[in-house]
Image: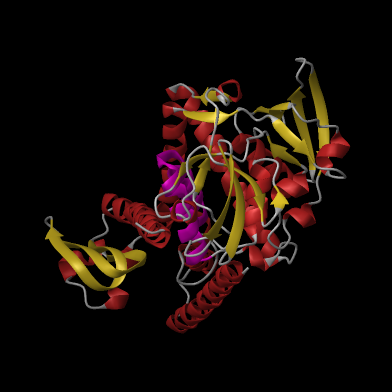
């Protein structure tokens, strides 16, 4: 399957799971609180599959447009209701019951993220130890005193055992706080040091920020020879006759010292015929390769490096927690991701963060495809992050979203009666316009990223 096909399929699977959980929250709480559910739909538009079941004859359906879903409940505002069922109509319920039903959707998204993080923590993952590679000059990391070879063992007083924990901890404190980040490292000799990094929050929230450069250090990476370990069938290298064991010594006559230099030399050559100088045993060969027809804007050769056996063993560790300890890890991960998302959204509203950080379906689909191709755990982590984002976005006080309904309920609680039908109609129209504007901006940002 092509990269586009993987991205599309992964996106549809992710959206289906997230929407199903969100709408199930509304559905489950509504039924438990005595409200009659008429339809539970994954997707909008023309039904592709419908099943009617249960004593209430509920319609369960999958519809043609997968970007959302809904739960239709009995409501006197939407049509006549039999006298015998009026007590089960949504509009007849107390403010507390209606609020619980509306909140249940976003709550289900947070619960999904919690369960996913818990599962990952219990199953365990093999992670690269958070050992610092290159420290970039004149950056927060260099000024704080980090050195190549230091292992980051805590951020903000919380133990870190993987690069994801390190980066989330630094971003959390860099974006939410004053920019001061306490970091504990252990150097190659085993000496522990407590350091403090001072980050610029405005830069972290700027337009398409390069996080690693702003923070100032990169993860440890081995220095590999520019030797091919494997060629990918149908790739540019295989088509040009390159073989496992070949060492690429130059690109267009410019020498390459290692694998990183090779990648850098090919990065800007997408769509071009490129001459490679190849060392094969005692022979030096010249090969023309066509870096075309890939799903990446960068030049892709279609090879994997030759990695010596055991190279990563000392730098890997299994990160796993017991079932009880995993609850705390899951709660911490969900809370941290939620607060970071809220802060970024708020700073977009106040103008402190760039609106170009907003992503739409195209960008999400790309990330879905990338993580799905990397394995189950990366895809689950992606799913948890997007589920949290979906829950938070649905709580925004925009009419037609769950947060808009909660806003109406607040008005009702203060004034003692619901908003007028006219106010609801105007709010609905305003909400549609706002959503269209947000979606248009997100699509524009996605297309701008693709265009480079």
Viewer-nearest residue: 415 or 451: 451
Observer able to see residue 57: no
Front in this rendered view, residue 91 or 433: 433
For this rendering, which residue is in front, 406 or 226? 226
Q: Residue at x 58, y 59 (%)?
A: 299
Locate residue 373, reporting x and y percent. 42, 48
Task: Please state if 124 lies on the left or on the right of 350 as rendered.
Answer: left
Q: Residue furthest front?
A: 283
In which quarter of the view is residue 67 placed? bottom left
In the rendered image, the vertical position of residue 186 relative to residue 163, given as above or below: above
Q: Position of residue 410 (x, y in %)?
A: 52, 63
Corner quadrant of residue 69: bottom left
Q: Is 359 one of the magenta-colored residues?
A: no
Q: Is residue 339 left or right of residue 150?
A: left
Please provide percent x and percent y for residue 263: 63, 49
Is residue 29 found left or right of 211 in the rendered image? left
Across and down, in percent, residue 309 comes to 52, 24
Residue in view at x 81 percent, y 51 percent: 200
- Image vertical order of residue 33 relative to residue 166, above or below: below
**Residue 293 seen from this side:** yes
Give the magenta-colored segment's residue range.
360-389
Q: Number of callouts in the render?
A: 0
Is 379 within the magenta?
Answer: yes
Which one is in front, 344 or 4? 4
* 226, above or below 162, in the image: below
Quarter of the image where the N terminus is located: bottom left
């Amino acid at each position: 399957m092509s990269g586009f096909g993987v991205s599309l399929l992964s996106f549809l699977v992710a959206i289906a799971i997230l929407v199903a959980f969100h709408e199930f929250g509304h559905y489950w709480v509504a039924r438990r609180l005595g409200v009659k559910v008429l339809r539970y739909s994954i997707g909008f538009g023309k039904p592709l599959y419908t099943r009617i079941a249960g004593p209430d004859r509920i319609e369960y359906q999958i519809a043609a447009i997968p970007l959302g879903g809904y739960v239709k409940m009995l409501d006197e505002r939407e049509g006549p209701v039999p006298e015998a069922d009026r007590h089960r109509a949504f509009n007849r319920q107390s403010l507390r019951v209606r609020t619980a039903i509306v909140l249940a959707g976003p709550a289900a998204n947070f619960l999904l993220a919690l369960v996913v993080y818990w599962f990952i923590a219990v199953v365990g993952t093999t992670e690269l130890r958070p050992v610092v590679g290159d420290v970039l000059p004149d950056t927060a990391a260099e000024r704080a005193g980090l050195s190549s070879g230091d292992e980051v063992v805590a951020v903000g007083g919380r133990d870190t055992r993987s690069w994801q924990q390190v980066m989330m901890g630094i971003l959390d404190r860099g974006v939410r706080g004053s920019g001061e980040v306490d970091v504990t490292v252990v150097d190659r000799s085993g000496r522990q040091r407590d350091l403090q990094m001072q980050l610029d929050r405005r830069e972290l929230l700027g337009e398409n920020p390069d996080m690693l450069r702003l923070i100032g250090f990169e993860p440890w990476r081995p220095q590999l020879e520019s030797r091919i370990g494997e060629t990918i069938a149908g790739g540019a290298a295989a088509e040009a006759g390159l073989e496992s064991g070949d060492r690429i010594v130059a690109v267009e006559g410019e020498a390459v010292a290692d694998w990183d230099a090779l990648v850098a030399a090919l990065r800007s050559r997408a769509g071009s015929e490129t001459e490679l100088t190849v060392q094969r045993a005692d022979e030096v060969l010249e090969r023309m390769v066509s870096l075309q027809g890939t799903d990446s804007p960068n030049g892709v050769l279609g090879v994997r490096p030759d990695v010596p056996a055991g190279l990563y063993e000392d730098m890997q560790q299994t990160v796993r927690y017991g079932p009880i300890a995993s609850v705390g890890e899951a709660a911490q991960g969900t809370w941290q991701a939620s607060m970071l998302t809220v802060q970024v959204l708020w700073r977009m509203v106040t103008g402190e963060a760039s609106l170009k950080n907003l992503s739409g379906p195209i960008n999400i689909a790309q990330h879905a495809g990338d993580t799905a191709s990397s394995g189950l755990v990366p895809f689950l982590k992606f799913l948890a992050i997007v589920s949290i984002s979906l829950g938070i976005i649905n709580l925004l006080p925009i009419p037609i979203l769950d947060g808009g309904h909660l806003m109406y309920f607040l008005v009702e609680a203060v004034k003692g009666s619901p908003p007028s039908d006219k106010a609801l109609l105007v709010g609905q129209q305003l909400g549609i316009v706002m959503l269209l504007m947000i979606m248009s901006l997100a699509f524009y940002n996605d297309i701008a990223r693709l265009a480079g």
